[in-house]
């Protein structure tokens, strides 16, 4: 009996709430649609073309000579960064000879498919790049600002084919001197991957691993 009374009262309450909500909705709708007329003077809002603003700015910079100065500074910075890139941080001259190895194997994270949709490497497969592509030349990492390292690598390059990679110094200058390409380990990508901390360092292939050797140079007196 109590349950029946409660259900009836709840139905009446629910109907009243819906009625109030409907009434408010209609009233708000009427208010939002009301026209209050025009108040004060109206103006057309015109947005200036951003392209024109940029062209005007460039014209002003050109007339004042600021653009030419800016271009000169940009060229100077670009040339400087090419001729002498930012040195790799944390690399020092070797004070002892150290040999260690790097395994380039990696596990395939997901199925690899060719352009026909055929799977050529399943997820979880271990792949070693050295199984198909060998290291053709020794990789030699040096600091060419160190005269001992520079003299050592120049002598080494005259007797065997190597790839010279700088961690500090001027690659273009050394390239002109040797008449062969000289590379730079930008941001230390290779030295970090291989775990090289000291130079000169020589990287060679040893079966399916890479052999790292950080070399303590014997200074000639």
Image (cartoon, helix red, strand yellow):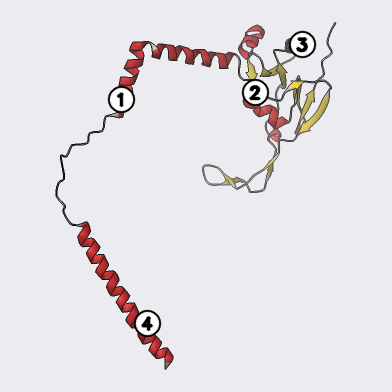
Q: Nearer the viewer, residue 12 or 74?
A: 12
Coordinates of residue 200 in the picture (x, y in percent) = 76, 19
Q: CA distance from mark 3 to mark 2?
A: 20 Å
Mark 4 vs 2: CB contact within 8 A? no
Most extreme residue toward the bottom, as rendered?
1
- Tell me the distance, in whole angstroms, between the alpha carbons under discs 4 and 2: 77 Å
**4 or 2: tag closer to the N-terminus:** 4
**Which disc is residue 148 wearing?**
3
Q: Position of residue 183 (x, y in %)?
A: 64, 19
Q: Mark 3 or 1 closer to N-term?
A: 1
Q: CA distance from mark 2 to mark 1?
A: 41 Å
SS class, disc 1? helix
User: In the rendered structure, which disc, 2 or 1, sits on the residue that comes first in sequence?
Assistant: 1
Q: Which mark is residue 102?
A: none
Name the residue at 32% across, 74% down.
17
Q: Earlier in the sequence, mark 4 or mark 3?
A: 4
Disc 1: which residue:
53
Q: CA distance from mark 4 to mark 3?
A: 95 Å
Q: Is residue 79 left or right of residue 88?
A: left
């Amino acid at each position: 009996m109590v349950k029946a009374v409660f259900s009836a009262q709840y139905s009446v309450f629910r109907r009243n709430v819906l009625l109030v909500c409907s009434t408010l909705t209609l009233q708000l709708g009427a208010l939002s649609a009301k026209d209050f007329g025009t108040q004060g003077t109206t103006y057309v809002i015109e947005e200036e073309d951003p392209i024109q603003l940029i062209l005007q700015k460039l014209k002003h910079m050109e007339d004042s000579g600021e653009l030419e100065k800016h271009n000169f500074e940009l060229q100077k910075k670009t040339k400087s960064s090419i001729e002498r890139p930012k040195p790799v941080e944390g690399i020092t001259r070797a004070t002892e000879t150290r040999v260690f190895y790097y395994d380039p194997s990696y596990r395939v994270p997901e199925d690899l498919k060719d352009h026909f949709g055929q799977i050529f490497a399943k997820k979880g497969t271990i792949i070693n790049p050295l199984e198909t592509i060998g290291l053709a030349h020794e990789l030699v990492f040096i600091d060419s600002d160190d005269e001992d390292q520079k003299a050592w690598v120049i002598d080494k390059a005259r007797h065997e084919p190597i790839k010279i990679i700088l961690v500090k110094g001027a690659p273009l200058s050394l390239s002109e001197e040797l008449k062969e390409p000289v590379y730079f380990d930008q941001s230390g990508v290779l030295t970090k991957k291989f775990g090289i901390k000291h130079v000169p360092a020589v990287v060679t292939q040893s079966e399916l691993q890479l052999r790292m050797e950080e070399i303590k140079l014997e200074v000639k007196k």
